């Protein structure tokens, strides 16, 4: 006969106790092995430097030779004979991202101790050749100045005239004129017909901007760089309906600066 006051005792759940302990052990072992492997890896000589440049835009401001030259200059050595541990990837990546032609750089080592450098270059949309401070630089799609290159000239729109900026040919665009020019050049470059039509942007002032087409001896008076969608919609409508019938030779200028109409001046 059982005593109702007798207590039942159960064996502890060994799986519940040993499970976390085993996972902890395996985790510490993994960390130890990884640390040992990384320590051994950091002492290995870098076998090669693989440079990949995404030149999908077709502009060739950067090349493998220029990146190699940058590395030699950065480390002040003619040969890249370092161990993996000698190279601080974060610092080198930061330095490459500061390069005026680099939009983004990504660096990593593979298991064979090869250094991979993947670079997305900046893409120019307009070249500024202004009247002030020996201006001669490009503005990229991301709104940064790119100095001209002695080895390569990009075939993009040209901006000339009285363009006020901070007097520097590198860095982020800052002035109101540069920002409006960037907005205008971006609008044109992203439109298939406009980018094929417009060759030059000329600033007489911020409120007196003229566009020079690639074909025809006439000019487009834009006024300021505001209301671009309305102005270019009117221009394309005129281009389709009027110029295609009568040709370009009869006009001297097309003025888009008015709000509700276009003024076309015929040649005398």
Image (cartoon, grey):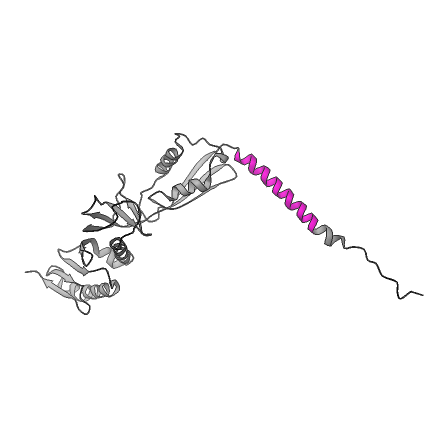
| Residue 214 makes an appearance in the image | no
Q: Percent x, y for residue 15?
A: 74, 53
In the image, residue 77 lies in the stretch drawn in magenta: no
Which residue does the image show at 52% across and 35% down from the upper left?
Answer: 42
The image position of residue 187, as x and y in percent, is: 28, 58
Q: Is residue 129 visible?
A: yes
Instruction: Report the residue at 69% width, 48% height from top.
Output: 22
Give the answer, above or below, for where 119 lies relative to 71: below
Which residue: 10% across, 63% down?
Answer: 265
| Residue 208 as seen in the image, left or right of residue 61 | left
Q: Quadrant of residue 63?
A: top left
Magenta span dominant secondary structure: helix
Q: Is residue 123 left or right of residue 252?
A: right
| Quadrant housing residue 91 | top left
Residue positioned most to the left: 268
**Residue at the spot x=28%, y=55% of the render?**
179
- Residue, far right: 1
32 within the magenta span: yes
Q: Nearer the viewer, residue 235 or 144?
A: 144
Magenta extent: 20-42
**Quarter of the view holding residue 203:** bottom left
Quadrant of image for the N terminus? bottom right
187 to the left or right of 21? left
Count of marks placed on residues: 0
**Where residue 46 appears, x then y in whole percent?**
48, 34
């Amino acid at each position: 006969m059982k005593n109702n006051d007798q207590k039942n005792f159960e064996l502890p759940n060994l799986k519940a106790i040993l499970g976390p302990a085993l996972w902890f052990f395996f985790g510490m072992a993994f960390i130890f092995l990884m640390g040992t492997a990384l320590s051994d890896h950091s002492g290995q000589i870098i076998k090669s430097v693989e440079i990949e440049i995404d030149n999908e835009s077709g502009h060739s401001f950067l090349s493998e030779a220029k990146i190699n030259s940058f590395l030699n200059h950065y480390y002040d050595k003619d040969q890249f004979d370092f161990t993996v541990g000698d190279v601080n990837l974060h610092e080198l990546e930061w330095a490459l991202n500061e390069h005026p032609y680099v939009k983004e750089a990504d660096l990593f080592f593979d298991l064979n101790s090869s250094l991979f450098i993947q670079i997305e270059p900046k893409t120019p949309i307009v070249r500024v050749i202004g009247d002030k401070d020996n201006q001669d630089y490009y503005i990229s799609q991301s709104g940064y100045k790119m100095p001209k290159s002695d080895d390569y000239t990009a075939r993009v729109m040209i901006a000339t005239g009285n363009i006020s900026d901070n007097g520097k040919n590198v860095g982020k665009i800052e002035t109101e004129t540069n920002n409006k020019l960037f907005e205008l050049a971006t609008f044109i470059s992203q439109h298939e017909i406009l980018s094929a039509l417009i060759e030059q942007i000329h600033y007489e002032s911020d409120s007196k901007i003229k566009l020079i087409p690639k074909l025809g001896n006439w000019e487009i008076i834009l006024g300021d760089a505001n209301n671009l969608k309305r102005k270019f919609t009117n221009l394309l409508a005129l281009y389709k309906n009027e110029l295609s019938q009568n040709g370009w030779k009869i006009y001297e200028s097309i003025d888009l600066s008015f709000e509700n109409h276009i003024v076309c001046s015929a040649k005398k």
